[in-house]
Image (spheres, rainbow, N blue to C red):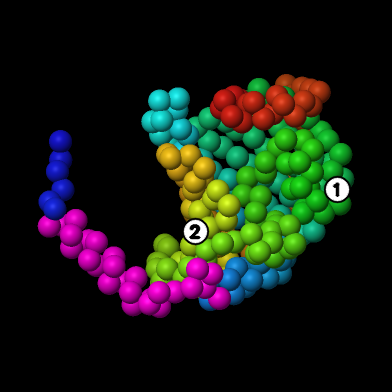
Amino acid sequence: MFRISPLLIAVALAMAGSAFAQDAATDPPAVDPKAMEALDRMGKALRALGPFSVHAESTAELVLEDAEKVEFSGQVDYQVIPPNKLHASLVSDRREREFYYDGKTLTIYAPTTGFYATLPAPATLRGLVDKAQNEYGVEMPLADLFLWGTDAAPASEITRATYIGRGRIDGDPVAHFAYRQGDTDWQVWLDGEALPRKLVIADTSTPERPEYTAQLDWSKGETVSADAFAFKPGDDDYEIAFFPTVVISASQEGGQ
C-alpha cells in the first residue's frame, strides 16, 4: 500500500494553516458579518437572473448498514426562464429523471422506463419547489437555487458563518465560505458575480457525515424555446398514476 510521508503531511497542514491565517481574522465571531453579507449578495444575484442554464457535476455519499460510505456520481442540467419555466435533467449512477414545468403543470419523466406523471403546479418556481417537496415528496435537484434570497431560506437558522478565504475554480477566482445550520454543515464558493460555483453539504446528524458536492457552470441570457418546458410523450412512453411514497422510495433505493 502506498504510504504518505509524515513530513509531507506536516508541510501540507502547515501551508493550509498559513493560507487560512492570511484570510481569516484571529478568533472570528461565530457568525461573521462578511459571510452573511456574501449570502445576501448570492441571493440577490440568483433572484436577478434572467433566462439561464446551469450544469452541475455532483457526487453524493450513501452510508451502508455497516457504516461504510459509498459514492455516486451524477449530472444535473437546468434550463430556466423565471418566473415560471423550467426543464431539468438528472443523470446519476442510480437513476435518471427529467422535470418539465410550464407554469401550470409539472411532469416527471423516467427515460429508462418511459413512465411519466403530470401534476398540477403553482405559478412560480419558488412555489413549484415548495409543493414538489412538501406535497409530492419530490426534491428538485439543487432546489436551494430557487430559494436563496427569499424568506424560504431564513438566515436566522444559521448558527456559524465563516469566511475561509480565496480560491480558484477552473481558473476563476472565488471566495470560500462555510456555514452551520441545524444538522447541516455546508460550504459555498462564490464567483465575482456572487453566483455559487461549488457547494459541499454535509449531514452532521450521523457520525459518518455523508456529503453532497456539486460544481456549477453557469450560462446566462441564452435563448430557450418554449417547447423545452412542455413534455411531449413518445410512442413508447406511458402515463402512470402518481404516488408520492413510490417516488420517495425510488430515490432512496436508486430505482429507475
Q: What residue lies at 63% left-to-right and 45% top-to-bottom?
A: 141
Is residue 47 depicted above or below 224 in this figure? below
Label 1: how many Cα within 10 Å (few below 14, some 14–19, many 20+): some
User: Left of 65 or right of it: where is 104?
Assistant: right
Give the tally of numbered discs.
2
Confirm whether residue 25 shows in the render.
Answer: yes
x and y percentages locating residue 146 in the rendered image: 70, 56
x and y percentages locating residue 100 in the rendered image: 75, 42
Confirm whether residue 189 shows in the render.
Answer: no
Work out whether mark 1 precedes mark 2 in sequence or the reverse, and give the earlier one.
Answer: 1
Q: Check disc 2 and report the residue beneath it.
A: 187
Placement of the N terminus among the 4 image quadrants: top left
Q: What residue lies at 45% left-to-right and 43% top-to-bottom?
A: 209
Q: Amino acid at mark 2?
A: Gln
**Quarter assignment of residue 28:** bottom left
For label 2, the SS is strand
> What is the number of the mark on residue 162?
none
In the image, which is nearer the foreground, mark 1 or mark 2?
2
For label 1, the SS is loop
Q: Check disc 1 and report the residue beneath it.
A: 122
For this rendering, which residue is in front, 198 or 133? 133
User: Left of 2 or right of it: where is 183?
Assistant: right
- Indicate whether residue 59 is drawn in magenta: no
User: Left of 95 or right of it: where is 236?
Assistant: right
Placement of the C terminus among the 4 image quadrants: top right
x and y percentages locating residue 184 in the rendered image: 54, 50
x and y percentages locating residue 211 in the rendered image: 47, 45
**Quarter assignment of residue 49:** bottom right
Range covered by the magenta-colored residues: 7-33
Q: What residue lies at 82% left-to-right and 54% top-to-bottom?
A: 124
Tell me the distance, in whole angstroms, between the alpha carbons under discs 1 and 2. 30 Å
